[in-house]
Image (spheres, rainbow, N blue to C red):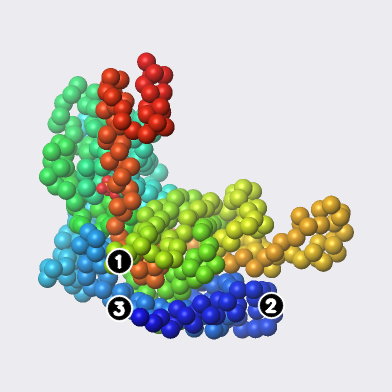
Amino acid sequence: MTHPAFEKLEKNFNQTKNLEMKTLFQEDKNRFEKFHLELDDMLVDFSKNRITDETFSCLIELAKEKKLERAIKAMFSGEKINTTEQRAVLHTALRNLSKKPIFVEDVDVMPEINRVREKMHHFSDSVRNGTFKGYTGKPFTDVVNIGIGGSDLGPVMVVKALKKYKPAHLNFHFISNVDSTDMVETLKDLSPETTLFLVASKTFTTQETMMNATSAKKWLLAAFNGDEKAISSHFVALSTNKEAVVKFGIDAENMFEFWDFVGGRYSLWSAIGLSIMIAIGYENFMDFLKGAYEMDIHFQNAPFEKNIPVILGLLSYFYITFYKAETTAVLPYDQYLERLPAYLQQASMESNGKSITKEGKKVTSPTGAILFGEPGTNGQHSFYQLIHQGTHLIPCDFIASIFSQNELENHQNVLLSNFLAQTEALMKGKTLAEVQEEGTPAHQLQHRVFDGNRPTNSILFDKMTPHALGRLIALYEHKIFVEGVLFNVDSYDQWGVELGKQLAKNILPEIEDKEKPLAHDASTNALIERVRTRRG
Ligand code: F6P
């Protein structure tokens, strides 16, 4: 099989890889005009990338060669594109605000989605206005989400990002780690009478979540002399597994369902987002969905040359495949987006950290990049040194909102000046001649040179609103989808998390019972022995 677009792109890479972006900017006064896109108040500048006009058109041709258009249609129409699990991938249905039906195996999924959302609406209102009360009749002051992975990272990121929209009388907490410290430290200042637990687990079998939920139940029952009737006033479940929810002791009435066509790391739009809806209220939650829905419309309809997720996905693929860039950074210049990098680590790395193609063959090129990040300007005083002068090429996404929601003197101007300066510095660098001109002492000269030519995207929007956040998350979801199509991997399974889980199950009884014989490798045996002897 021939791949003319890929070969053309490869040829273009070989011709352009040594070009300097700063020269490209000097030569083409229209470069920014050509290489930026806008969607309402969101501007995406991708002009500081190592591409020429020809690279850009090769990338667009490649997307066509890889049948991206067909793949997008397949996802939105409910085809089972998660082939290894034989599932549709329809997180987009959760924010389908059109009146159009969406079918999975000939059944329109929209009525059920809308029914559960309405149930969430009533419930979140009743927690917010205090009509849904704890067992002793007190309104809730604290909502604790117990979940892990996609049942934690999305909700925690969004609740933090939209803190400005949270009512003052409600506090939100997230327990994910099976380390008891997480639970003990969270619950130590809470009162069982006014604490509501949301047990969030798609499968309702995840070891960490089930263990944490069981301990939370004990904590609650201890305060009510073991009166199990208290559970229905303090526990709700967000899950696809009704049987396990009921078995755990949560009333089916207190369950908010979702379905297997919603992947865990794409589930914050579903019942898993109940903590978000309680925190920001139904109307804001709808705005959040609307932002995502608008990105869905853009992604489905904009031609590839003007399609933001398509372009960001193509660029990422380009650096990973040709420049062998192994890492990427997401750098939000908005404190509210503090947890965005952690959220995107799962979204991206659990989706595209694969080495087997959809046809079951070993890939021949690298796939998903290692993602990291911190809010600006904290990162600047930490790892930016390596991004500026290290030996690795690290394409970065810089994200900022123009207006602060907590204006304090000149802070926002300083923040934005840093945001703008960083991408300029990464692109331009600093030559030896420039360093010399500054009168730098000889022993420092080489050390103060910046090669530059380091690629960045800038994503800039007005304000961190529910709408803007929904749009931003959907943008990344679709970018990850595009990368998956280009890498030809199943972005919606996660078999890579299974082996560790399995082995932990074998080791647990060996920690509990000191007499059990050990049959691991010498290192694992010795480590288990060490734990056994030190614990006595
Ligand atoms: O880490 C594996 C994983 O299956 C994730 O994909 C998922 O988000 C997380 O565990 C939690 O799963 P659940 O929601 O079923 O508890």
Residue at image point 26% right, 42% down: 206
The x, y position of residue 237, in whole percent, is 21, 44
**Residue 320 left/right relative to 379:** left
Q: Which residue is mark 2?
A: 23
Are the residues flagged by discs 2 and 1 in contact, CB closer than 8 Å?
Answer: no
Q: Which residue is the site of mark 3?
A: 70
**Kind of residue at badge 3:** Arg
Q: Is residue 444 left or right of residue 342?
A: right
Is label 2 in a helix, a strand or a loop? helix
For disc 2, does the CB lie below 8 Å from ligand 1? no
Front residue of 371 and 373: 371
- Mark 1 = which residue? 358
Q: CA distance from mark 2 to mark 1?
A: 40 Å
Q: Residue 125's x, y, as percent? A: 26, 50
Q: Residue at x 25, y 53 (%)?
A: 271
**Quick one: SS at disc 1?**
loop
User: Could you say which is closer to the camera, residue 450 or residue 528?
Assistant: 528
Q: Residue at x 62, y 48 (%)?
A: 382
Residue 124 in the image: state x and y as whole percent.
26, 49
* Residue 35 appears anywhere in the view: no
Vertical placement of 72 versus 209: above or below? below
Residue at 26%, 28% (x, y): give it: 509
- In three-dimensional space, the C-alpha distance between marks 2 and 3, rounded to whole angstroms, equals 37 Å
User: Circle 3 sits in a helix, a strand or a loop, which is it?
Assistant: helix
